Image (cartoon, rainbow, N blue to C red):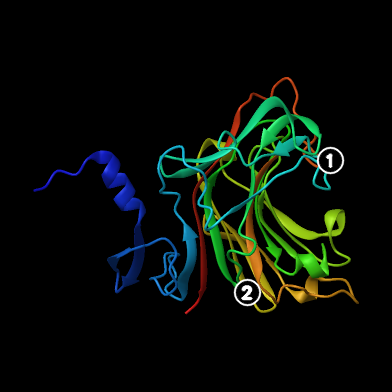
Amino acid sequence: MTFVPFGRWLRVMKTLVLLLACAGGTAVIFLAAAGNGAAGLPAQSGDANWVLTWSDEFDGPDGSAPDPAKWVLETGGGGWGNSELEYYTARQTNSHVEKGKLVINALQEKFTGPEGVTREYTSARLKTQKLFAQKYGKFEARIRIPKGQGMWPAFWLLGDDIATAGWPACGEIDIMENIGSEHATIHGTIHGPDYSGSDSFGASYVLPVRNVGDDFHVFAVEWEPNEIRFYVDAQLYQTRTPSDLPEGTRWVFDHPFFVNLNLAVGGKWPGNPDASTKFPQQMLVDYVRAYSRR
């Protein structure tokens, strides 16, 4: 038997997909190699009807920047429409790959950007805009979120016509949001024209754990024509359809969307960090995957 170092074994196992199918009471296990997101690879979602179309497994060298072929790093400290306190940078101090995970670091530090804006915190915000977008499908990520007052991690989708349609007419699907004061609660939300911000449609899922930030969890949506289903750890907790919308408003979830990951500090919703908030705060992302219907 050839000896395989434990670290290498972990990396190999991470690229395997485990699908369980039960027939006549007998469990059948299938293992399939999973690459870095080439179209047509076997489904990895536990449902053979989904086919992997894009992914990032964050298997680059430790300390390396997020793959520039997959992610754009947004920068700026203008509050992002939510009175947020962080300055998003493209520095590897704030986002890098480590041990097969994307690390988004929120730091308490004074930082002045090239436009002269100074903030007391830094963090990172990544998007796949102009690199990957998809109409309909399953989008999921395995994430360990931070925990602390004022922290606001998010995994979300945004309509790729934002440059022409603007927000919220482009549409937004928030797959996972958490605010640090809610230790075990995940929020999933849709935003569109005349139903955005405080008037958006969403629901909360309370995990049966003391704190969601104690471990990794899988956050997902299954988005199909006229229906978006939200999941935490494969548990369906809400379904949204055009019938949810107020009369006279438009369902705008019928064109390609791109993927976003970010860790905000403070803002209108979570409130600001306080004396109990310890820095640095980290959002760890094991993988992000997108699928289409077979």
Q: Position of residue 199 (x, y in %)?
A: 86, 58
Which amino acid, by three-letter code, is at mark 2? Lys
Q: Position of residue 255 (x, y in %)?
A: 69, 75
Which amino acid, by three-letter code, is at mark 1? Ser
Which residue position holds label 2?
135
Question: Height in image: 215 above or below 257?
Answer: above
Q: Is residue 272 visible?
A: no
**For mark 1, does the 10 Å Cα neighbourhood hold few (<14), some (14 to 19), or many (20 or more) residues?**
some
Which residue position holds label 1?
83
Question: Height in image: 57 above or below 247?
Answer: above
**For mark 2, does the 10 Å Cα neighbourhood hold few (<14), some (14 to 19), or many (20 or more) residues?**
some
Q: Is residue 291 visible?
A: yes
Residue placed at 85% from the left, 64% from the top?
195
Q: Judge from the rendering whether residue 125 lies leftward or rightward of residue 271; answer left or right.
A: left
What whole-number distance in Å separates the C-alpha atoms at marks 2 and 1?
A: 31 Å
Count of marks placed on residues: 2
Q: Nearer the viewer, residue 221 or 85?
A: 85
Residue placed at 73% from the left, 19% from the top?
275
* Mark 2 vs 1: CB contact within 8 A: no
Residue placed at 55% from the left, 37% from the top?
92
Which badge, 2 or 1, is on the more N-terminal residue? 1
Q: Helix or strand or loop: what does disc 2 sit on?
A: loop
